[in-house]
Image (cartoon, rainbow, N blue to C red):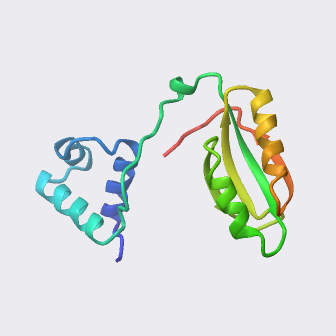
Amino acid sequence: MKITAADQQLLSVLRENARASTAEIARRLKLSRTTVQSRIERLQRSGVIAGYTVRVHDQAEIGHIRAHIMITVLPKQMPAVVETLRAMPELRSLHSVSGPFDLVALGVAPSVGEMDELTDRIGAIDGVERTTSSIILSAKFDR
């Protein structure tokens, strides 16, 4: 399905607040409520909108340490490593990337010590060659 510029704007509003009412979205986009509703339904039917999720407010995890954890995986070990990482609730996302690392994970832990323990657990996974972490100091924006 081709995503139009109007669809992109709609998706951007939904990323900010997927619980916004159709009327509120319509006002922001200067479209009719019916148009917004039909676009949302079309995007859902076509699979562009695959689902909705919860975004936890930063204040709920105030003081938590967030880090990008770059992971190098031994050849042919990727599927097993990914499944082991998927089971770690401290990891919020995992991306396959190009460059010197194979994966980048977003980890969240209540303290520096627990982040250290998380990176040690990741490094101990069979098939993980090495990890490098970067603590996130602040988010400039998040969509």
Location of residue 131 in the rendering, given as x and y in whole percent from the top left corner: 84, 52
Q: Is residue 136 left or right of residue 2?
A: right
- 55 in relation to 57, above or below: below
The foreground one among 103 and 125 is: 125
Residue name at image x 16 percent, y 44 percent: 23
Please give the name of the residue rendered at 62% of the width and 54% of the height, measured from the top-left corner.
86
Q: Residue at x 51, y 25 (%)?
A: 60
Looking at the picture, tell me which residue is in the foreground, 122 or 27: 122
Total marks placed: 0
Judged left or right of residue 133, residue 18 is left
Q: Which is nearer the eye, 94 or 38?
A: 94
Q: Is residue 47 left or right of residue 61?
A: left
* Residue 130 locus on image (x, y percent): 87, 55
Q: x, y (%) of residue 95? A: 65, 60
Instruction: Specify the farthest residue to the right.
Output: 129
Q: What percent of the width, then of the height, locates residue 62?
A: 59, 23
The N terminus appears in which quarter of the rendering? bottom left
**In the rendered image, the vertical position of residue 62 relative to residue 84, given as above or below:** above
**Side of 82 relative to 24 (left or right):** right
Location of residue 5 (image quadrant): bottom left
- Residue 20 picture quarter: top left
